[in-house]
Amino acid sequence: MKWFISQDTIKGPFQKILEKECGENVRLCYQCGKCSAGCPVSYQMDYLPNQIIRMVQLGMQDEVLSSKTMWLCASCLACTARCPREIDIAEIMDYLRRRAYKKQVIPLEETEVPLFNKIFLRNIELFGRLYEMGLIGMFNLLSGEFFKDIFLAPKMFLKNKIEILPHRAKNIKEIRAIFNNSGKLGKVKRTRLFYPKLVFLNLSRKLIGKIEKYK
Amino acid sequence: MKYAYYPGCSLHSTAKEYDLSTKEVAKALNIELTEIPDWVCCGATPAHITMHLLSLALPVKNLIQARKMGADEVVTCCAACFSRLKIANKFMEDDPAHREKVEKIVGEEYEGEVKVRHFLDVLVNYFGLKNLGERVTKKLSGLKVACYYGCLLTRPPEVTQLDDLEDPHLIDDLMRTIGAEPVQWPYKTECCGASFSLTKTDIVLKLSGDILQMAHDEGARAIVVACPLCQSNLDLRQDAINKKYKKNFNIPVFYFTQLLGLALGVEPGKLGFKKHAVNPVPLLRENGILGNL
């Protein structure tokens, strides 16, 4: 691919901010491509992991944050374990996701994972331990795939693999305090239960998909 | 041997058989596991993606609970919990800046003094394979298995410090000790798609399908795992994989504790074989390991 990159972008602060906030030195990367070779999900990414690192080196914040790559990262840590320059690439992917949340930049083609993480954490905040039924129900409802995995449900109930009612931890107040304090100390803005923007993106994507199917 | 036991969310729901069989194996070997009172979720992948400090504070909270019950060591069975607890411990030990912030969040002091072990580590490295071999009452001879480790048991190596990074062998050693035959195969540490189980099911079906295919090609009749997410992706989604890629896989996916339990003479009914989506009983009968369940 070809890009024209302005001097402003290259001299911009993105690379320095990243190095300071996540503690990884991206300048060490010499583009061997080992991270992308071992990445199990690279076949679905728009930019490969090594390309993302190069883009960070060149300060291309907008292109990086709006790419699908980091949302498709499975956090399997193969890249981190194999990098000959000892760059923690998975941590950089984590950082990019956190920054995308902060800047509220979500790629239009990749909206489920950002929503899922929020619902998962809200679930923990409410119950202390994961309440699977709530997680699946809430995710299906808010992402617009109402009947996803419905055929698995009877199997799981019969085998007693999933609880219908939540189990709330006794020290739930302490857990909520931990959530609140981490939000404050990490300067992360915590959104309300229904994440309007993420839900809107997901639902509209599903709707457009349906319409295109009928065309 | 006495340990604090951190089951984690999965072992109380989708991976109940892992919890059951772990407790049975521990009982048979006189390893005392006491569940941490009021444990909470470790935050798993969504926490470190969204809030860095939260992903350290939640595990630390659990480790402090363990310290309060007087334990020096926590045992966990879930590979993801293991990884999160270990990473949190490492930050608390080596990084004063993070330690200060996390202590502020949790409201208590902690310097990583409670050690974290995977149950596999306890069995192989502390209990010892020789000791274990002496207690085996029923060899699982002739059972060809593929030992599958997944991502977080060995990566990142400087944190988990458990096994070889690219060619781990702890489960293989264990299986050999109880008489099963582990096959040599190259997908030991491939990723099954793990946290995408609900969000990007297509990816899970492809990655898990590849793993099943490779295990099948190398002649394994069953897969042995040590992670609840690997098990649910390979077992529960095997039907969907068969449908999507037009295959006929019928490969049971065991937790290593279940097979170990069988070999130690634990009553099969207590090991949760009925909870599998792919029924493992015919295979076990075929190999003469099980009578009537």
Image (cartoon, coloured by chain):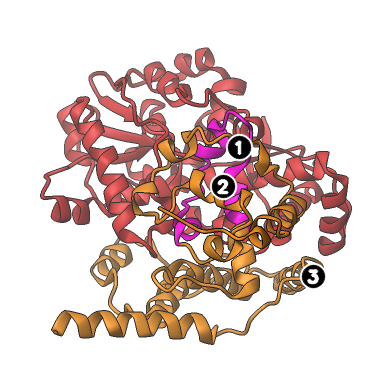
> Which comes before the other along the chain, label 3 or label 1?
1
Q: Report the front residue among B89 and A43.
A: A43
What residue does disc 3 label?
A181
Q: Which residue is mark 2?
A: A53
Please, is residue A180 above or below residue B187 in the view?
below
Q: Is residue B17 above or below residue B182?
A: below
Name the mark on residue B81: none
Q: Residue at 57% of width from left, 56% of height from top?
A: B44
Estimate the x, y position of residue B27 in percent, counting from the top left. Answer: 53, 35
Whether residue A71 appears in magenta in the rendering, the answer is: yes
Q: Earlier in the sequence, mark 2 or mark 3?
A: 2
Real-space Cα distance between discs 3 and 1? 35 Å
Q: Give me the residue at 45% from left, 43% from top.
A: B227
Q: Are marks 2 and 3 on the same chain?
A: yes
Kind of residue at disc 1: Cys
In magenta stretch: residue B177:
no
Sequence-first tag of 1 and 2 = 1
Identify the magenta region: A68-95
Kindly identify which residue carries mark 1: A29
Label pair 2/3, CB-CB below 8 angstroms = no
